Amino acid sequence: MGIVRIEIDEKFLPGLDVFGAKYRPFSDNVPALSTSDLNPADFLFLEGRDGKEGHPDLWYSKHRLQTSPSVKQIGKNLGLDLADTAQEKNGRGYIGNINHGQALRLNLLLGGRTTNAKIETDVFRMLLSGKAYDGRGKIVDKGEIDGLLDEKVGVRNPGRAEWLEDSFKSAGNGIVLMKNYVLQGDVLVPSYNAPLRGCLMNNKTPGINFRNWVKNSTSQGWPRANIKEGETYYWSPTAGNVARLVAYSGRAYLVGNGDPHVANSWLGVRHLRVAPKK
């Protein structure tokens, strides 16, 4: 059983001691990562988009989230003993062994959020164009761009994966997409709820065409029903499940039927936040 957080008046703590109940104080006074704590060179700059499916200017991490004193402290308050359990190709460690809810909470408590399929298509489109800028406004070297693509979807070992925030529930005869999560107390609440529109709703193993998905996705970032065939494996969204990207020596996947409770050493998450105003 995981750690359960409850609020109780301090005057009742001696009673818990009498019964031998184990507890520890929980503090919300853990500073989130401020922009000044971050290296802008570690982020891609993603220009904002207007509309319901849009987003403000964003800093998108080039790497999956790794441990730091602030990250470990916030993890501790979540009942997590965080560690870098896997490595990217460049040797940079990253945090694994976190499930979907833990990943989203961690990013929110750090002052950011988690990426989703729509944002991923924007990022992939930028990387495939060969022209990207970092958080300093400096152009990213082509070799680094290629490395970022390889880290996310390169067909090679070791296996790598990362959570997306997209989750799904049934409504009537359809599937509702939930994303743009916020925390209300300890509860993750999606500020976006809308039916999936025009999305491919059957699995393709193989496969869908990666570039066609990226360049011609639905407005919500998912493959269209008429997407071209290709080598990227695809599991369609299903109620009660969540999204992630996976790649290893056999193939790359876009997963919409992921178990939100799964956690393993090479399944991490990226940190995303609103870009500071210039």
Image: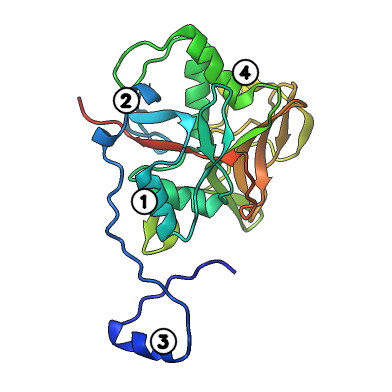
Q: Which residue is mark 3?
A: 17
Per the image, the residue denoted by label 2 is: 40
Residue 227 sits above or below residue 73 on the image: above
Q: In this view of the protein, which residue sits in the foreground, 108 or 8?
A: 8
**Category of crowding for the residue at label 2, using alpha-carbon neighbours closer than 10 angstroms: few (below 14), some (14–19), many (at least 20):** some
Q: Which residue is mark 1?
A: 109
Residue at 47% over, 49% down: 104
> What numbered label is drawn on residue 211?
4
* Residue in the image at 41% along x and 49% along y: 72
- Amino acid under label 3? Asp
Q: 206 or 263: which is nearer to us? A: 263
Q: How many marks?
A: 4
User: Which mark is first along the chain, 3 or 2?
Assistant: 3
Secondary element type, mark 4: helix
Q: How many angstroms separate mark 1 from mark 3 (CA)?
A: 30 Å
Disc 3 on helix, strand or loop? helix
> Which one is closest to the eye, mark 4 or mark 3?
3
Residue 190 visible in this rendered orientation of the protein: no
User: In terms of sequence position, does the residue under pointer 1 or pointer 3 come before the other?
Assistant: 3
Horizontally, is 8 left or right of 150 in the view?
A: left
In the structure shown, which secondary structural element does the residue marked by tag 2 occupy? helix
In space, the residues marked 2 and 3 are separated at their CA atoms by 48 Å
